[in-house]
Amino acid sequence: MRINWEYIKLAFLSVSIVALYGFADQRNQRKMVEKVTVKFVGENNLYLTEDAVNKLLIQNYGPLENRPKEQLVLNTIEEVILSNDMVKNAQVYLTVNGELVSKIVQRKPIGRIEGVSKFYLDDQGKRMPLSRYHSARVPIITGKITGKTLEDAYVILDYINNDDFLRKNIIGIHIEEEGKYQLKFRMENFVVNLGGVDNLNLKFKNFMAFYAKAAKDNSLEDYATVSLEFNNQVVCTKI
């Protein structure tokens, strides 16, 4: 019987590779966490600090440095970080050098509600608590706060944030009632009666045409109210 040495060599090599891999993996799991790093991704990371994240982790796990890597469950650590109201997304991983890294995306407020309860509205239309570390410079929302009016306020804010002029100049939204929203501008004395959130593109297009003409005529200070509620027209009331 002829022995096929090539098959034997291949089998021996395969077993050796599996054994080495298992040994390396076991050795890697026994390594300690050398360093804990918190990285904030994106801009305007003002509402949560690295110290606050580290305290959150210590409260739930105790000190993580010098902890065996095999004791860590990364998905669970991610869930703990995501439990913080200021966190939009989190990714936790271990490097080959034993560094535990937490990459965090913070939530972004686009409006601030001033009522019986005070909180932010974030860029996904969800309620976001105020931060102890930073106060966002965003439009103030006042008036009759309900689930529906907040949904409408989010639609208005989302439109505003996609226009450079409106984002820089609108500082407030007042809710008279559902379907009746007023806008307050930074430099102008007049109030803009927006009406509902229907046809926002047309309403703001008409407003921009009015604003450009009034600015050219130096007559912006003559108006008390500017109404966009009526179909395809701007109705103004002078002081």
Image (spheres, rainbow, N blue to C red):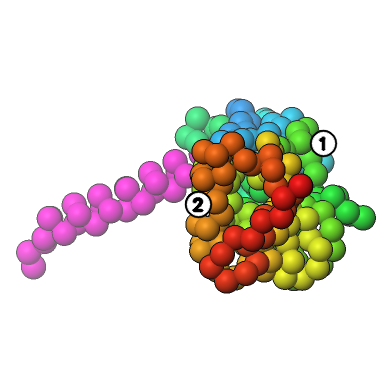
Looking at the rendered image, the quarter that the N terminus falls into is bottom left
Camera-side residue of 56 and 121: 121
Seen from the viewer's position, the closer of residues 238 and 106 is 238
Q: Is residue 94 left or right of residue 22?
A: right
Disc number placed over residue 209 in the picture, else none: 2
- Picture coordinates of residue 128 (x, y %)? 75, 52
Task: Say whether residue 126 is visible.
Answer: no
Residue drawn 20% across the image and 54% down it: 10
The residue indicated by pointer 1 is: 132
Chain part drawn in magenta: 1-28
- Given residues 53 and 166, the one toward you in this image is 166
Q: Are marks 1 and 2 in contact (CB under 8 Å)?
A: no
User: How packed is label 2: few (under 14 Cα within 10 Å), some, or many (20 or more)?
Assistant: few
Res. 218 image quadrant: top right
Label 1, label 2: how many angstroms apart (C-alpha)? 41 Å
Residue at the spot x=44%, y=41% of the render?
24
Task: Left or right? Give the position of 163 relative to 223.
Answer: left
Pinpoint residue 25: horizontal percent, then vertical percent: 47, 44
In terms of secondary structure, where does tag 2 sit?
A: helix
Question: Which amino acid is tagged 1?
Answer: Arg
122 and 157: which one is in front? Answer: 157
What residue lies at 78% left-to-right and 33% top-to-bottom? 133
The x and y percentages for residue 135 are 76, 36
**Is 123 one of the magenta-colored residues?**
no
| 25 part of magenta stretch | yes
Please name which of the two marks, 1 or 2, marks the residue nearer to the observer.
Answer: 2
What main secondary structure does the magenta stretch of the protein show?
helix
Kind of residue sitting beneath label 2: Ala
Q: What is the number of callouts on the image?
A: 2
Earlier along the polypeptide chain: callout 1 or callout 2?
Answer: 1
- When the figure is inspected, residue 56 is found, relative to residue 228, above or below; the finding is above
